[in-house]
Amino acid sequence: MKYFLVAPLDGFVSTGMPGVRRDAPAPRSSLAMRSRVDYQTDELGQTWSTISAADIPARENLRVEGAWLVSIRQRSFLALTVESTGTISGSLSEVEEALSDLALDFAASHSGISAAPLWVSRTLLLPSTSTVPIGWIDGEATTIALDRSDDDSVELRLGWGNNAIVGWDEAVRVEESQLLLGILDAQYLWVDIEALSSKSSTSIHEIVDGDGRDSGSLRRKLLLMEELSTSLALHNLAYDDLLMHVQGAQRATAVALLKAWNYDDITARVARRIEDTTRVLEQKTSRRERGYQSLVEAILFGLALAAFLELVIVTISTAYEAHSTGIEHDNSPFGIFPWFQATDPDYVIGGTIVVILAIAALVAFVRLRRR
């Protein structure tokens, strides 16, 4: 039996490291879509670099036939083709563990790979005369068949963790590469949305568990949510590139894998989580700003009332100063100064204070009614 293993690495690994030979890309057409195997992508360009597997020992009757370091955007993947040289003892779960441990050992033993695998995707490559072992694919698997002109068929059974390609011996060389490219596209989109989900979950806990009383902390959290929204937009660009530009068996494989993993539902939930968290932060920031605004308005209102009281006192002082210097205002058209001169200053100041308190009480009442 043959297997194709894909392990997303927790960190970007440069293809220029020792022991890695970057494969020359095939010449491309100037057309955006020349055929179903010759097309241009905007976001999901893959770089496959060959890794020497000569010094990697076999494990549990498993031998690495080929190894590649695959780069998509700023993420790296370890891709292995593995041949079973004998019978692997144990149950299917133990077979899965042996394959996963082989990928882990390969990454750990290679001096140039410093990033650890996040998980291992296992695809069983079967000839058309073989059947998929019972229990290898879960009950929610997606099955697709390649449309071929002859009687031979290539069937893909795609599920969670394990996949199977039946008719691998019937697939032509181009189709084989397209199937593997599709698996890498799906793995990139899944690891990217998983990282977004993890970051957004951490952000929500920080917002819920934090006191939120520091305005600087709120601004930092808003900036974090802005970065998450930007990352989600870039992720959507990659998915749009898959739907719009990727063709043939590569597109069919990637779309079927994502369907088997409920990718659309997960992406919608992550997007809604980011939107809801951003909305909560904006509400907290708005409530805090309203508190500051109310405080500033109260201060300005108090200053205005104090200025009004000061104006009354200055007017009284001016009126008495004019009276003491012998300046008469009998012919005043308004009679303001004579009225102040004839009225006891205690009554004037007391009445002013009462008016100020009445205005303040009225303003406070109106604000309470608005709340």
Image (cartoon, rainbow, N blue to C red):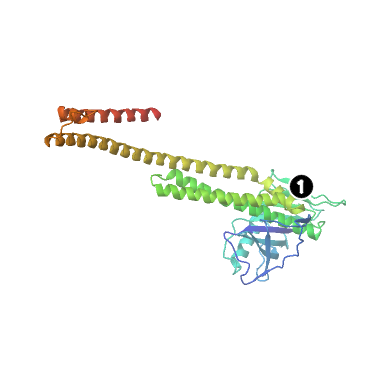
Measuring 67% from the left and 52% from the top, which residue is drawn there? 186
Which quadrant: the N terminus?
bottom right
Measuring 68% from the left and 59% from the top, which residue is drawn there? 45
Which quadrant: the C terminus?
top left
Q: Is residue 280 visible to us here?
A: yes
In the image, taking residue 283 as reference, residue 333 lies left or right, namely left
Measuring 61% from the left and 45% from the top, which residue is drawn there? 267
Q: Residue 127 location, x and y as percent?
A: 80, 55
Q: Residues within 10 Å of mark 1 (few under 14, many from 20)?
A: some
Measuring 72% from the left and 45% from the top, which residue is drawn there? 142
Give the structural element (helix, strand or loop) at label 1: strand
Which residue is at the far front?
331
Depicted 207 relative to depicted 37: above or below: above
In the image, taking residue 145 as reference, residue 320 lies left or right, namely left
- Residue nearest the viewer, comparing 324 with 194: 324
Depicted 183 relative to depicted 106: above or below: above
Depicted 183 relative to depicted 304: above or below: below
Residue type at tag 1: Ile
Q: Is residue 91 visible to us here?
A: no
Figure label count: 1
Q: Residue 292 location, x and y as percent?
A: 37, 41
Q: Residue 325 location, x and y as percent?
A: 12, 37
- Residue nearest the viewer, comparing 227 with 118: 227
Residue marked by disc 1:
144
Which residue is at the far right?
150
Q: Residue 210 location, x and y as percent?
A: 42, 45
